[in-house]
Amino acid sequence: MSDTPRGTLTIRTLAMPADSNPSGDIFGGWVLSQMDIAGGICAIERARCRTVTAALDSMSFIEPVKIGDVLCVYTELIGVGNTSLDIHVEAWTQRARSGHEKKVTEAKFKFVALDKDGRPTPVPAEKD
């Protein structure tokens, strides 16, 4: 496992008490939501249109996220199809007291580009 995040920092957010269970661990669904938002930002920036999440591969949590940690989500575009984009997403935590960064989880997300009527549309060629 790498000790350096892969991709571009896309989101930084603070883990708050409302996002945790009674033991102070942040819900996995909240982490997944932040990853989906970051992947969506990456997809929209590349597709230059509306995108939706179509799928993601499996996720395993390596480290818990605690109240007060800063969740850092990194994205990397790894593939472009006709109407789809594959994006590698990693979530890292910066511990509130120590500042140490640790990988929390990672997944590959697939997004689909949509036209104004909500139908799949080709992803345009890259800008120069």
Image (cartoon, grey):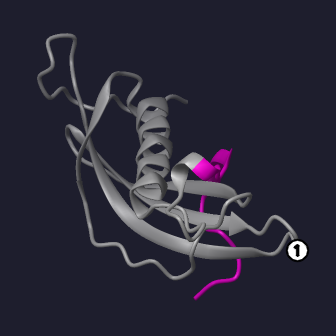
Q: Position of residue 17 (x, y in %)?
A: 62, 51
Q: Is 68 positioned to the left or the right of 46 in the image?
A: right
Q: Position of residue 67 (x, y in %)?
A: 67, 60
In this view of the protein, which residue sits in the foreground, 35 or 39?
35
Q: Is residue 14 magenta?
A: yes
In this view of the protein, which residue sits in the foreground, 59 or 127?
59
> Which residue corresponds to mark 1?
98
The image quadrant where one finds the C terminus is top right
Q: Is 113 positioned to the left or the right of 120 in the image?
A: right
Q: Residue placed at 14% from the left, 12% from the top?
A: 117
Q: Residue placed at 42% from the left, 31% from the top?
A: 44
Magenta region: which residues?
1-17
- Look at label 1 and name its amino acid: Ser
Q: Position of residue 53 (x, y in %)?
A: 27, 43
Q: Position of residue 35 (x, y in %)?
A: 47, 52
Mark 1, secondary structure of its residue: loop
